[in-house]
Image (cartoon, helix red, strand yellow):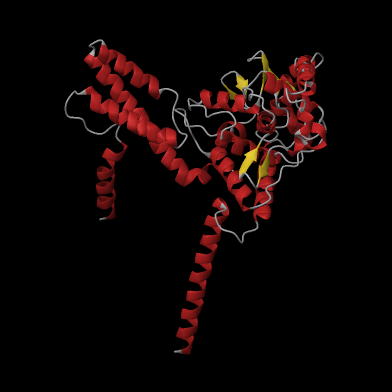
C-alpha cells in the first residue's frame, strides 16, 4: 500500500519538476514572458544563471527574423533554465546547511 | 496509577525539552532572536571550519593558509616563490601610497578618515557598523571617505581602488586578522555570508564550499582549488590572469562566472557579507596582502 502511495505522489510531482509548464500551441511570446518572469524571480534571490538572458535574447532575435521553430526551441530552453535557477534558489534557502561538510 | 502519572509527566517533559532544543537550533542558524550567545556560536563555527582543514591537510601549518593554494601544493608554491623574488604588486603599492598621500580638493586626505591615519589597520576589516547596520569593507570605507570629502567614488574591482587597498594592506603586514561579530545584527550579516558560502548556485550547481572545502587541493580543470581558510588575507592581489591588481570582490565575481552564476555587484550586500564570513573564519592568520596569484 505504501509503495502505491509513493508511486502516486511521484507521478503527481513529475509536472512540478518537468522542464516547463505545458504550452499546447506553438506561441512563443507567452513562453518568453513566463521565462522572463521566472528569471526575474530567481535574480531577485541572487540566483540568476549567466546563460538564461542570452537564450531569451536569442529567442527574441529568432522570432524577429521569422524563424519561429528556432525561437520556440530557445524560448523553451530559457524557461527551463529560469525554472531550474528558481528551484535552486528555493532549495538553497531551505537546505543550505546541508552543504556544510563538517 | 501514580506510576502512569509519573510516566506521562516524564514524556511531557521530554517533548518540551525537544521543542526547546529545536527552537534553539533554528534560531541559532538565523540569529533572529536575542538571548543567544552569538559570540560562542561564531567561535564554534571558527573551530569547526579550521579543524576541517587541519584534518584535510594535516601536514600544513595553520599560519601557512594565508598563502592560498600555495600553502597546500608544493609545485605551485615553488613557482610562486620564484615569482615573489620580483613581486608584481610592488608598483601597485607605490602607486597606492602616492594616491593615499594626495590630498582631496578640500585639503583633507585619506588619513583623516581612518584610525591611526590609515596605517596598520587592514586586520580590522571588514567590520560590522552597528549604526549603519551593515558590513564595512576596507574598499567601501575608502570610497565612503572619498564621498565624505566631495570626491567621486572609485570603481571597486581594480585600478586606483585596488592600489589604495594594496598600500593600506602593506602597512598592516604581519598583523593578525581580528574581525569579530559583536552583536545580533552583526550575526545576521555573518549568517547571510555563511549561507552564501554554503549555497549551491549557477548552472554548474556549485557552492563556495564545494570548490574550496570539499575539492580544495584537487584539480578543477587545469587549476588546483585553494582552501577557503585564508582567502581574504592576501587581497588585493596581482593576478596573472588579470594582468593587474584586483580586489577580493573581483575574484568573487570571477568565481561566480566560472560556475555560470551571474556575478553580484562588487561591494553589494551579498559579497560584503560573504567577505565578513570568510574573514571571521580566517581569524588568527596574518595580513599578507597584497600578494600574487596565478
- Residue that sits furthest to the left in the current view: A25
Residue B257: x and y, percent?
52, 23
**Left/right of residue B124 with respect to residue B189 in the rendered view:** right
Residue B141 falls left or right of residue A75: right
Instruction: Tell which of B257 and B271 is nearer to you.
Output: B271
| Outermost bottom residue | B1
Q: Which residue occupies the foreground of this view, B221 or B280? A: B280
Could you say where residue A20 lies in the image, as x and y percent from the top left? 28, 32
Report the residue that reaches farthest toward the top: A65
Q: How many marks?
A: 0
Quadrant of the image containing the N terminus of chain B: bottom left
Q: Position of residue B117 (x, y in %)?
A: 81, 33
Q: Is residue B288 visible?
A: no
Residue at horizontal 23 percent and vertical 23 percent from the top? A28
Give the image location of residue B14, x and y in percent: 51, 71
Q: Quadrant of residue A19?
A: top left
**Quadrant (top left/top right/bottom left/bottom right) for the C terminus of chain B:** top right
Q: Is residue B100 visible?
A: yes
Q: Nearer the viewer, residue A11 or A73?
A: A73
Q: Is residue B224 left or right of residue B202?
A: right
> Residue shown at 48%/70% (left/top)?
B15
For this orientation, the residue located farthest to the front is B106
Q: Residue at x 18, y 23 (%)?
A: A26
State whether residue B257 is above or below residue A62. below
Residue appearing at x 26%, y 13% in the figure: A64
Q: Examine the image and state in which quarter residue B140 appears.
A: top right
Amino acid at each position: 500500500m505504501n509503495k502505491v502511495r509513493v508511486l502516486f505522489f511521484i507521478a503527481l510531482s513529475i509536472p512540478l519538476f518537468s522542464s516547463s509548464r505545458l504550452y499546447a500551441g506553438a506561441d512563443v511570446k507567452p513562453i518568453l514572458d513566463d521565462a522572463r518572469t521566472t528569471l526575474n524571480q530567481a535574480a531577485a534571490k541572487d540566483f540568476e544563471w549567466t546563460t538564461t538572458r542570452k537564450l531569451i535574447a536569442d529567442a527574441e532575435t529568432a522570432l524577429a527574423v521569422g524563424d519561429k521553430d528556432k525561437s520556440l526551441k530557445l524560448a523553451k530552453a530559457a524557461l527551463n533554465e529560469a525554472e531550474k535557477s528558481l528551484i535552486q534558489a528555493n532549495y538553497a534557502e531551505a537546505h543550505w546547511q546541508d552543504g556544510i561538510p563538517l | 496509577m501514580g506510576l502512569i502519572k509519573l510516566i506521562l509527566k516524564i514524556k511531557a517533559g521530554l517533548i518540551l525539552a525537544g521543542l526547546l532544543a529545536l527552537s534553539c537550533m533554528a534560531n541559532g542558524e538565523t540569529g533572529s532572536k536575542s538571548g543567544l550567545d552569538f559570540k560562542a556560536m561564531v567561535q564554534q563555527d571558527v573551530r569547526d571550519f579550521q579543524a576541517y582543514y587541519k584534518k584535510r591537510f594535516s601536514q600544513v601549518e595553520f599560519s601557512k593558509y594565508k598563502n592560498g593554494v600555495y600553502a597546500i601544493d608544493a609545485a605551485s608554491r615553488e613557482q610562486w616563490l620564484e615569482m615573489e623574488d620580483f613581486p608584481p604588486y610592488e608598483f601597485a603599492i607605490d602607486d597606492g601610497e602616492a594616491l593615499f598621500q594626495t590630498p582631496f580638493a578640500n585639503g583633507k586626505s585619506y588619513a583623516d578618515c581612518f584610525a591611526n591615519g590609515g596605517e596598520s589597520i587592514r586586520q580590522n576589516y571588514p567590520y560590522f557598523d552597528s549604526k549603519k547596520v551593515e558590513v564595512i569593507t576596507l574598499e567601501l570605507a575608502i570610497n565612503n571617505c572619498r564621498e565624505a570629502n566631495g570626491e567621486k567614488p572609485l570603481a571597486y574591482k581594480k585600478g586606483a581602488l585596488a592600489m589604495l587597498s594594496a598600500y593600506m594592506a602593506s602597512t598592516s603586514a604581519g598583523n593578525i586578522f581580528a574581525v569579530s561579530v559583536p552583536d545580533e545584527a552583526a550575526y545576521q550579516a555573518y549568517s547571510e555570508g555563511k549561507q552564501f558560502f554554503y549555497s549551491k548556485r549557477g548552472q554548474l550547481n556549485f557552492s563556495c564550499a564545494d570548490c574550496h572545502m570539499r575539492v580544495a587541493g584537487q584539480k578543477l580543470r587545469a587549476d588546483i582549488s585553494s582552501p577557503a581558510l585564508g582567502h581574504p588575507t592576501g587581497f588585493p592581489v596581482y593576478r596573472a590572469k588579470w594582468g593587474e591588481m584586483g580586489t577580493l570582490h573581483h575574484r568573487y565575481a570571477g568565481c561566480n562566472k566560472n560556475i555560470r552564476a551571474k556575478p553580484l555587484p562588487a561591494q553589494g550586500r551579498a559579497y560584503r557579507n560573504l567577505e565578513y564570513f570568510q574573514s571571521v573564519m580566517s581569524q588568527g592568520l596574518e595580513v599578507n596582502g597584497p600578494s600574487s596569484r596565478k
